[in-house]
Amino acid sequence: MVKFDHMTLPVTNVRKSRDWYVKTLGFKVEFERASIVALQDSAGFTIFLSKTTKKLAGAKITLTLQVKSVDRTHQELAGKGIKFAHQPQNLFWGYGAELLDPDGYMINLWDRVSMRKAMRTKS
């Protein structure tokens, strides 16, 4: 069995992205070196933000993050002026909300309770 431990996310502005992930989503800075910042979530998963010299275009990855409550998290972030691509609702992947980071990476927010309810209604 393997465990997904870390990934590298190319970004156009490391500092801006670092600040956004820390202030918006609560990631912690694990370390910073040259043009790389290591951010860690509450489960110990690390995302390396790495400066890219190329334009970020085309299809991008989607990060799916579990929160305690999608509705409460949405309310808190929207109250801080964070823009959402999709408000909390039933989406093709279940119940959640979607927002974009500074480079346009989609962030899906979900929680266990809402997801269970959404999956029961799809059956």
Image: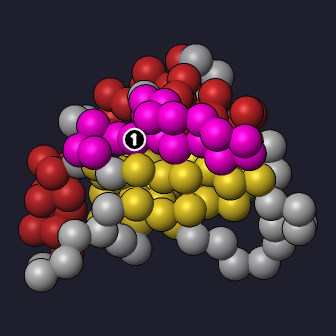
Look at the image and name its color scheme.
Answer: secondary structure
When asked about the image quadrant of residue 93, the answer is: bottom left
| Residue identified by numbered label 1 | 40
Looking at the picture, tell me which residue is in the foreground, 54 or 100: 54
In the displayed orientation, state which residue is furthest to the front. Answer: 33
Q: Residues within 10 Å of mark 1 (few under 14, many from 20)?
A: many
Q: Is residue 67 visible?
A: no
Q: Is residue 96 visible?
A: yes
- For the magenta stretch, what is the residue range? 27-44
Count of number-bearing discs: 1
Residue pictured at 12% horizontal, 81% vertical? 1
Residue pictured at 60% horizontal, 35% vertical? 32
Q: Could you tell me residue 57's position as x and y percent?
A: 83, 72
State yes or no: residue 32 in magenta: yes
State yes or no: residue 55 in magenta: no
Looking at the picture, tell me which residue is in the foreground, 69 or 87: 69
Of the 4 image quadrants, the one containing the C terminus is bottom left
Q: With 70 as the anchor, is 68 left or right in this view?
A: left
Residue pictured at 57% horizontal, 71% vertical? 61
| Amino acid residing under circle 1 | Gln
**In the rendered view, would you say 117 is above or below 69?**
below
Q: Could you tell me residue 70's position as x and y percent?
A: 32, 40
Magenta stretch: helix, strand or loop mostly: strand
Q: With 75 as the anchor, is 31 left or right in this view?
A: right
Q: Could you tell me residue 118's position as x and y percent?
A: 20, 62
**In the rendered view, would you say 101 is above or below 105?**
above
State the SS at label 1.
strand
Residue pictured at 55% horizontal, 52% vertical? 48
In the displayed orientation, state which residue is furthest to the top. Answer: 80
Q: Could you tell me residue 84's position as x and y percent?
A: 59, 43
When asked about the image quadrant of residue 90, the answer is: bottom left
